Image (tube, grey):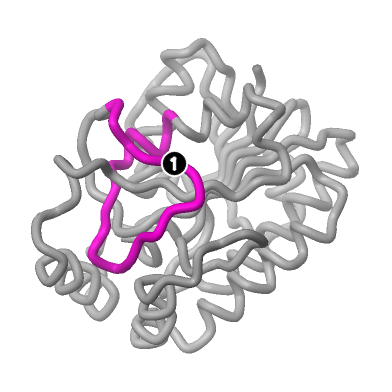
């Protein structure tokens, strides 16, 4: 499948590029700094540009069959809202419908549990950005009322590592103390892409007990640390919001 990829230079993006190419997909990737993408492959095309530039987004979507997005971050929160809207517009122009988006588990969708952990993450996110929650909620509202075949994957703090095969998915009662591996998210993105049953759903994902990050207090402190002082290499929403 020919895929348009946005937010590929972040933690999830690195794992996604490898898994998508290894699975035989052809990728068109939008990157502000193409040198950050170290993978080389004849099926990989890099478009230099910004996700808030309509022309760059349209050039990335053109000729593809579906889009994968990991846009956002505390330093660039409006790219969640603006970039996703531009992707949707470009997809309509190109005649494509399928999109899979990665975002934080703070976003509300019908049928979600109203546990304490989901309520706690929102004020924590405000410590990193005053507008990120509003921008991501605006994106979620727009995607739900639009006519694309969307899936929004929602994750807690993201760690690096190989796929575990034990990640939990669905409507989960998770909080800021939970975590999940980047390769597990990448695998779920590609699985959702191929599964019509996931269209217009918003599954959460979190590591199983063996990868839960230790006691709740430890996981909570790690999430708070990454919000207040995010890793310099983290550039996507999945890195800076959910991580």
- 242 or 109, which lies in front? 109
Q: Is residue 118 left or right of residue 200?
A: left
State the extent of the magenta-drawn residues as a range. 165-187
Q: x and y percent of residue 237 in the render? A: 45, 60
**Front residue of 143 and 169:** 169
At which x and y percent is residue 119? 43, 79
Is residue 172 part of the magenta span, yes or no? yes
Q: Where, by quadrant of the figure, is residue 215 drawn?
A: bottom left
Give the structural element (helix, strand or loop) at label 1. Answer: strand
> Dot 1, how many residues are within 10 Å of its Cα: few (below 14), some (14-19), or many (20+)?
some
Q: Which quarter of the rendering shows the N terminus?
A: top right
Residue pictured at 67% horizontal, 64% vertical: 140
Residue 32 seen: no
Residue indicated by mark 1 = 169
Query: How far across and down, in percent of the image, does residue 105 sit?
Result: 46, 62
Of the 4 image quadrants, the one containing the C terminus is bottom left
Residue visible at 36% across and 65% down in the picture: 240
Query: In the displayed structure, does residue 222 sit left or right of residue 193?
Result: left
Residue 130 place in picture, x, y as percent: 48, 88
Give the answer, above or below, for where 200 lies relative to 1. Answer: below
**Observer-nearest of 223 and 67:** 223
Q: Is 86 part of what is drawn in magenta?
A: no
Residue 123 appears in the figure: yes
The residue sitting at 33% across, 66% down in the picture is 175
């Amino acid at each position: 499948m020919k895929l348009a990829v946005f937010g590929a230079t972040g933690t999830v993006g690195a794992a996604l590029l490898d898994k998508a190419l290894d699975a035989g997909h052809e990728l068109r990737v939008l990157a502000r700094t193409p040198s950050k993408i170290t993978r080389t492959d004849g099926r990989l095309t890099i478009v230099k540009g910004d996700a808030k530039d309509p022309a760059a987004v349209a050039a990335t979507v053109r000729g593809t069959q579906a889009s994968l997005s990991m846009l956002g971050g505390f330093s660039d929160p409006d790219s969640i809202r603006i970039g996703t809207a531009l992707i949707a517009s470009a997809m309509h122009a190109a005649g494509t419908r399928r999109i899979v988006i990665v975002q934080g588990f703070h976003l509300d969708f019908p049928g979600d549990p109203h546990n304490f952990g989901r309520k706690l993450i929102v004020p924590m996110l405000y410590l990193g950005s005053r507008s990120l929650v509003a921008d991501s909620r605006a994106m979620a509202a727009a995607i739900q009322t639009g006519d694309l075949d969307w899936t929004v994957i929602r994750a807690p703090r993201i760690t690096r590592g190989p796929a575990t095969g034990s990640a939990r998915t669905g409507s989960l009662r998770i909080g800021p103390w939970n975590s999940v591996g980047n390769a597990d998210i990448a695998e779920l993105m590609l699985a959702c892409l191929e599964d019509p049953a996931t269209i217009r759903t918003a599954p959460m994902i979190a590591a199983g007990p063996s990868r839960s990050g230790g006691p709740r207090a430890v996981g909570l402190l790690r999430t708070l640390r990454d919000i207040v002082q995010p890793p310099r290499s983290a550039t996507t929403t999945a890195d800076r919001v959910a991580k």
